Image: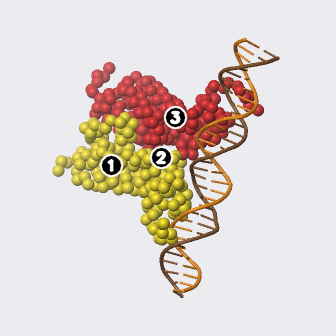
Chain colours: A red, B yellow, C brown, D orange
DNA sequence: TTTGAGTATGTACGATCGTACATAAACGAT
DNA sequence: ATCGTTTATGTACGATCGTACATACTCAAA
């Protein structure tokens, strides 16, 4: 018997985590209160108690996902100590799995859901600006724009093709853009 | 009173067109038999008569969309008579609206739905290969890969930012990639 | 110990969903 | 003209949906 009346504040977060799992596994179009509740191991009523409806759950779930992605993105680039290391980090972001399969799927769901939900739309825009700002730690704005586009698109295409990306090729693409747009810099 | 029993073969196509409209306006997660039927101006029973369920409708709708997009893509690049014109065509694809807002949205829905539906997944892969092949009319494979990624990602980011893309900037990105990956060619 | 406020839950309700299917109209063959 | 076949429709059914809400439980203060 589950304790009733107990104050369980991180239940909210567990529901959000469960929602993200469900979204990643089934897609938004098959995500419902009941499925989320079952996955989180909480009663149905909890969802209406903690959240303001299904859209609210989805919005908070996507916000959580975007925050986690943004943090990884930032950490990955902040760790680089030279432009070369920054380029390598970008290649890693593109080729390596900086996210699980379900996370990537959930990210896609966020992008498409953002076309129909104002809050999630803002989330997408913020995530774009933050990731570009992280690239801005090492690159000028034109470079950051183009690289960010690649970080988005290459993994997507790879998901359709099935074959893993060739790191050397990706590195060459990154280098071509950097050489074109970055001002010359002294070799320290 | 609508005629009953009449053979109306292009009703199938009207339903598919209506489904695409609904998907573009509301998203897959809010697309239902009844909404599509109302939009197409056909009775509910028609959908079960012509199609094998909602997934079937969505799959055929996305197939229709992908075919139209692929054709435009191909036509746009086939019209170019030099590499420079090809580059300009790519810039047009990226910046110009080669698709309506609803079409772009529907394309996104296809991408995300493809993560959960095998047939639509294949559709995404085919669309990738076809668009890359169209770029292959003018560019080598490495260039085509990178340009294709940009055609996908730049409009997406622009949709989030709101501001239109700068054509000169996009042209510079395209040129940087072409110069890096294309073998030198005589100026005829 | 009582009590009141805050926390949490199970259930029930109306709406909507996908789809099956009995019915009906139209058409082609005889 | 009749009749089987094909084409099409309207309705109805069970399942599931989101959500409201009466109820139950806990805890801290009095």
At which x and y percent is residue A129?
40, 30
Query: The N terminus of chain A appears in which quarter of the rendering?
Result: top right
Vertical order, D29 against B166 (above or below): above
Q: Is residue B174 above or below residue B22?
A: above
Front position in the image: B136 or B114: B114
- Same subunit: marks 2 and 3: no
Q: Quadrant of residue D2?
A: bottom right
Q: Secondary structure at mark 1?
A: loop
Specify the quadrant that holds the C terminus of chain A. top left
Q: Residue at x 61, y 40 (%)?
A: A33
- Give the CA separation, mark 1 to mark 2: 20 Å
Q: Which mark is residue B27?
A: 2
Q: Please give the chain letter of the residue carrying mark 3.
A: A
Q: At which x and y percent is residue B120?
A: 49, 52
Residue B158 horizontal side relative to residue D16, left or right: left
Q: Nearer the viewer, residue C21 or A86?
A: C21
Q: What label does residue A59 carry, if any?
A: 3
**Crowding at mark 2 (Cα within 10 Å: few <14, some 14-19, many 20+):** many
Count every numbered label the image shows and give the total.
3
Residue A100 visible at all: no
**Tag 1 near tag 2, CB within 8 Å:** no
Kind of element beneath mark 2? loop
Per the image, label 3 sits on a secondary structure element best described as: helix
Residue A171, horizontal then vertical, whole percent: 38, 36
Residue sitting at x 33%, y 32%: A143
Q: CA distance from mark 1 to mark 3?
A: 30 Å
Q: Say which mark, if any, is on residue A160.
A: none
Q: Residues within 10 Å of mark 1 (few under 14, many from 20)?
A: some
- Give A10 or D4, whichever is nearer the viewer: D4
Residue A80 in sight from this viewpoint? yes
The residue to which callout 1 is attached is B98
10 Å crowding of disc 3: few (<14), some (14-19), many (20+)? many
């Amino acid at each position: 018997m589950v304790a009733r009346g107990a104050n369980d504040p991180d239940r909210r977060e567990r529901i959000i985590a469960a929602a993200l799992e469900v979204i990643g596994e089934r897609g938004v179009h098959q995500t419902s209160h009941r499925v989320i509740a079952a996955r989180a191991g909480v009663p149905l009523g909890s969802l209406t108690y903690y959240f303001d409806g299904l859209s609210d759950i989805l919005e908070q779930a996507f916000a959580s996902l975007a925050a986690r992605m943004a943090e990884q993105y930032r950490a990955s680039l902040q760790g680089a100590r030279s432009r070369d290391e920054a380029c390598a980090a970008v290649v890693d972001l593109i080729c390596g799995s900086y996210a699980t399969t379900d996370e990537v799927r959930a990210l896609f769901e966020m992008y498409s859901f953002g076309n129909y939900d104002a809050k999630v739309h803002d989330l997408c825009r913020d995530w774009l600006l933050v990731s570009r700002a992280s690239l801005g730690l090492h690159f000028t704005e034109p470079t950051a724009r183009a690289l960010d586009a690649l970080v988005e698109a290459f993994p997507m295409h790879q998901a359709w093709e099935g074959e893993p990306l060739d790191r050397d090729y990706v590195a060459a693409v990154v280098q071509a853009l950097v050489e074109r747009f970055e001002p010359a810099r002294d070799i320290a």
